[in-house]
Image (cartoon, helix red, strand yellow):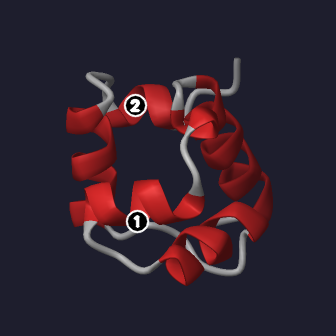
Amino acid sequence: MPSYEKQYLWQTIKRVEIGKLTQQQLGQILHVCNQTISFWEIGSREPDLDNLVAIAKYFEITIDFLYSVN
């Protein structure tokens, strides 16, 4: 995934309430460690499909929305 898409992904995630959670809280929700969340935030790693689905379900949004530019 190009780096600009990673930026859009994390910016969108932050817009949908995830920004109100700590890395530890989000990690507990998704069953990943908070370091994984940190890697997603800085763009060195990206969520796999299972985690994208979990994020979308938890926050009641679509995966398409996660990748939206707006």
Q: Secondary structure at mark 1?
A: helix
- In the figure, residue 33 lies in which quadrant? bottom left
Q: Are marks 1 and 2 in contact (CB under 8 Å)?
A: no
Give the mark, 1 or 2, whose residue is nearer the N terminus. Answer: 1
Up the image or down, 58 lies above or below 35; here it is above
Relative to 12, 30 lies left or right: left
- In the figure, residue 55 lies in which quadrant? top left
Q: Secondary structure at mark 2?
A: helix
Q: Residue at x 52, y 24 (%)?
A: 16
Q: Nearer the viewer, residue 10 or 58?
A: 58
Q: Amino acid at mark 1?
A: Gly
Up the image or down, 6 lies above or below 17; here it is below
User: Residue 30: horizontal and vertical position, in percent?
Assistant: 29, 61
Q: Amino acid at mark 2?
A: Asp
User: Residue 1: horizontal and vertical position, in percent?
Assistant: 60, 67
Residue on which the image places disc 1: 27
